[in-house]
Image (cartoon, grey):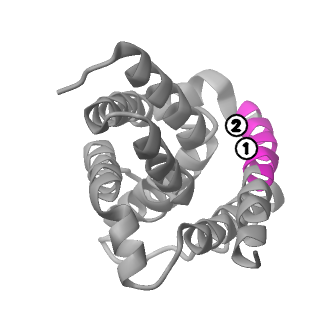
Amino acid sequence: MNFNYKEILTAFMVLFAVIDIIGNIPIIIDLRKKVGHIQSEKASLIAGFIMILFLFVGQSLLNLIGIDVNSFAVAGAFILFFIALEMILGITLYKDDSSGSASITATVFPLAFPLIAGPGSLTTLLSLRAEFAIENIIIAVVLNIIFLYIVLKTSSKIERLIGPTGIQIIRKVFGVILLAIAVKLFAANIKELFV
């Protein structure tokens, strides 16, 4: 075991920036309105499980099915792009599930994947693995998941604090930011596909 606090802190900050849970608060509130309830524990555990599993088998899995990391990131960029359009334009592209499993569906898609454990965070994990010890990355992932859980649990209180107008403003602003992240992710990876 090679625990290094500097590596843990660096990996935590990088993942925190990529996951952008604070920026995703308007999306979480919007999902909660659509489906009524989001299972915070399940969303956090699923996202954490996906991230840690991908840390170990991500590169091999993508190679096995013939997909490179850049193609994976471009696909994720499209998903983020459409979520951003929903936020900015106030339209619904993600169909509501009218059955009782709506909250379970929303917990897994799009919340746990691809919003939290999405292409950005998964490709970041692969990059971090090349630089840092795996146990330090795992600790950074767990710390991010704990913070994520706290935000998911308190999102309704945050909504009350900010108010409906504040939520709409934040939603539009973060929609534009998410759109920019999607474009950046797309641009950074699409050129690698044609090299």
Q: In the image, 101: left or right of 87?
A: left
As drawn, the residue found furthest toward the left would be 1
List x then y, in percent, for residue 69: 54, 67
Label 2 crowd bin: few (<14), some (14–19), many (20+), radius 10 Å? many
Q: CA distance from mark 1 to mark 2?
A: 6 Å
List x then y, in percent, for residue 101: 30, 71
- In depth, the one of 21 and 185 nearer the eye is 185
The residue wearing badge 2 is 167
Residue occupying image coordinates x 58% and y 32%: 22
Residue 136 highlighted magenta (yes or no): no
CB-based contact (under 8 Å), mark 1 and mark 2? yes
Q: Nearer the viewer, mark 1 or mark 2?
A: 1
The residue wearing badge 1 is 171
The region drawn magenta spans 166-180
Decide if residue 25 is in sight here.
yes
Residue 45, relative to residue 145: is it above or below? below
- In depth, the one of 16 and 66 nearer the eye is 66
Residue type for callout 2: Ile
Residue type for callout 1: Arg
Residue 35 location, quadrant: bottom left
Residue 78 location, quadrant: bottom right
Residue 77, relative to residue 130: is it above or below? below
List x then y, in percent, for residue 54: 34, 58
Kind of element beneath mark 2: helix
